[in-house]
Amino acid sequence: LVILRGDGLVLNGTNLQSEKPFKFSGDVPIHCQILGDEVIDLGLIYRRDKLSAKMELLQLSKPEIQYFEPGTHLFFCLSGGLKVNAIKANEGDTVMLEGPYEATLGPLGAKASYVYMKLVE
């Protein structure tokens, strides 16, 4: 889970702030309190017995060629616009790649911020 906008929230006693992914199990009771008026978050739900997952917030200021290992790779554009090969993603769009795959990632403008998520069997 990552907070995209807002003051954050308290999840099972842990204070979650913007742009810091937090991993937790959905198998336990969840107690949540919103800090401030409104929070927008992005969650990645998966079966831990079948998959492993990774989530991180990244930025690009110039195109980069990257190799992606086997698995499912998701790029959720936060701001600035993101280009994955010929695919353009605006704010709120998601691009999915199935690896292994080599791709050129770059910003549509001066800089792109995005959430990168990887799922592997």
Image (spheres, rainbow, N blue to C red):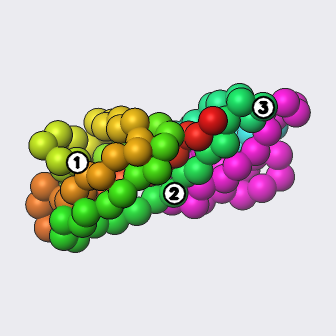
What span is in magenta?
1-30
In the rendered image, residue 83, in percent from the top left (x then y), is placed at 19, 50
Residue visible at 13% across and 55% down in the picture: 108
Q: Is residue 51 left or right of residue 90?
A: right
Amino acid carrying mark 3 in the image? Asp
Give me the C-alpha separation between circle 2 and circle 3.
Answer: 21 Å
Residue at mark 1: 84
Q: Is residue 103 left or right of residue 73?
A: left
- Label ID, residue 56: 2
User: Which residue is farthest right?
Assistant: 28
In the rendered image, residue 86, in percent from the top left (x then y), is placed at 12, 43
Q: Residues within 10 Å of mark 2 (few under 14, many from 20)?
A: some
In the rendered image, residue 35, in percent from the top left (x then y), is placed at 63, 50
Give me the C-alpha separation between circle 1 and circle 2.
Answer: 17 Å
- Whether 105 is drawn above or below 121: the answer is below
The numbered mark, 1 or 2, whose residue comes first in the sequence reads 2
Residue visible at 65% across and 31% down in the picture: 46
Q: In the image, is residue 58 part of the stretch drawn in magenta? A: no
Amino acid carrying mark 2 in the image? Glu
What secondary structure is found at the residue carrying circle 1?
Answer: strand
Amino acid carrying mark 1 in the image? Val
Residue visible at 59% across and 50% down in the picture: 54
Q: Is residue 29 visible?
A: yes
Quadrant assignment for the C terminus: top right
Residue visible at 22% across and 70% down in the picture: 61
Quadrant assignment for the N terminus: top right
The numbered mark, 1 or 3, whose residue comes first in the sequence reads 3
Q: Is residue 16 left or right of residue 37?
A: right
Residue at mark 3: 49
Q: Quadrant of residue 95?
A: top left
